[in-house]
Amino acid sequence: MAYVKARDFKNALICFQQALKKSPNDSKCIMFVGNCYNELGEYTKAVEYFQLAINKGGINATLAGNISDTYQKLGNNPKALYWLQVRCSLDPMEAKKRKTIALIKKLQNPLSNPKGSLDAPDYLSGLAESHTWQNNLLPIKVCILKNPKRPEIYADFRRIAKAALDEWCTAIGGAMRYEFVDLPSRASLVCTYTDDPSEVRSDHEVGTNGNTTVHIANINNQIDRTNSVILVAKKSGGKRLSPATIMKLCMHEIGHAMGLNGHSPNNHDVMFWTSNVPTIRPALSERDKNTIKRLYVEYNKTQ
């Protein structure tokens, strides 16, 4: 438990496994093993041990909550919702918490339940919607706004946002170009950053620290402007997130800005429904690239 407190889950796991050799039917210890696997990103093993804990000692509110958390990280929101509701039934006080009520609402939202095969070449058909940018707006005019409350972050954020834009545009190919402008009034894609979590709160993304608003023109059902906000610190004045984490968030939100309205069910894709899993790399997966390429190259004329 000292290792757990220190967040050294690798050594904690070793200790719990040694304990299980002496007490193989200890359901609490089995649950702790599952918790360690969950923290280490081995979610399938975590679920196996949680199920074993149920078999040995029955279900309780804490265990149900742990299972729900693991299924969220796996991207299986229906099962995450089920186990969260089990937790609430076992602990009525949990059901009254604002955080729990908000999480249930998010897990019930269709946009938080991406469909499609985990290993298909792309996930375009599983998105809620997809749109392309209007050709007459190319190259997209991009403005990276400086947050006056955190000016010291601007240079690095601009560099990271540019790298994210470059990755998406390279994946799309010649069908997408952009150029920077200085004023948001001249831009069709505005991107900024914040250290205020309330500014990136979303009704359909759990654990993704960013938010993108996409405006679709009625005349042709294509994108004419977007606004993205990225959380770069967990609290006002707090320590800045790592460049890799900020890159993941930029990649995800710019994917929405490019027209991908919805999420991938595969936690190896940038467009997975939450960035709070270690398997998401700060770079486009082949499925991300194939999806955006299909949207712009194969379907651009029909959008």
Image (cartoon, rainbow, N blue to C red):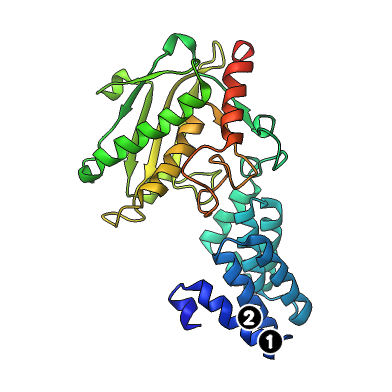
- Asked whether residue 96 appears in the rendered view, the answer is no
Please tell me whether residue 37 is drawn above or below residue 256 in the rendered image: below
Q: Amino acid at mark 2?
A: Gln
Secondary structure of residue under mark 1: helix
Q: Position of residue 179 (x, y in %)?
A: 34, 19
Secondary structure of residue under mark 2: helix
Residue found 71% across the figure and 36% down from its top: 120
Asked if disc 1 and disc 2 are in contact, CB closer than 8 Å, the reply is: yes
* Residue under label 1: 21
Q: Position of residue 62 (x, y in %)?
A: 62, 74
Please tell me whether residue 49 is drawn above or below residue 281 in the rendered image: below
Q: Which mark is residue 17?
A: 2
Report whether 108 appears left or right of 154.
Answer: right
Q: Position of residue 119 (x, y in %)?
A: 70, 41
Q: Which mark is residue 119?
A: none
Please tell me whether residue 157 is drawn above or below residue 178 in the rendered image: below
- Asked whether residue 251 appears in the rendered view, the answer is yes
Please tell me whether residue 289 is drawn above or below residue 249 in the rendered image: above
Residue found 75% across the figure and 74% down from its top: 52
Within the image, what quadrant is residue 87 found in? bottom right
Q: Amino acid at mark 1?
A: Lys
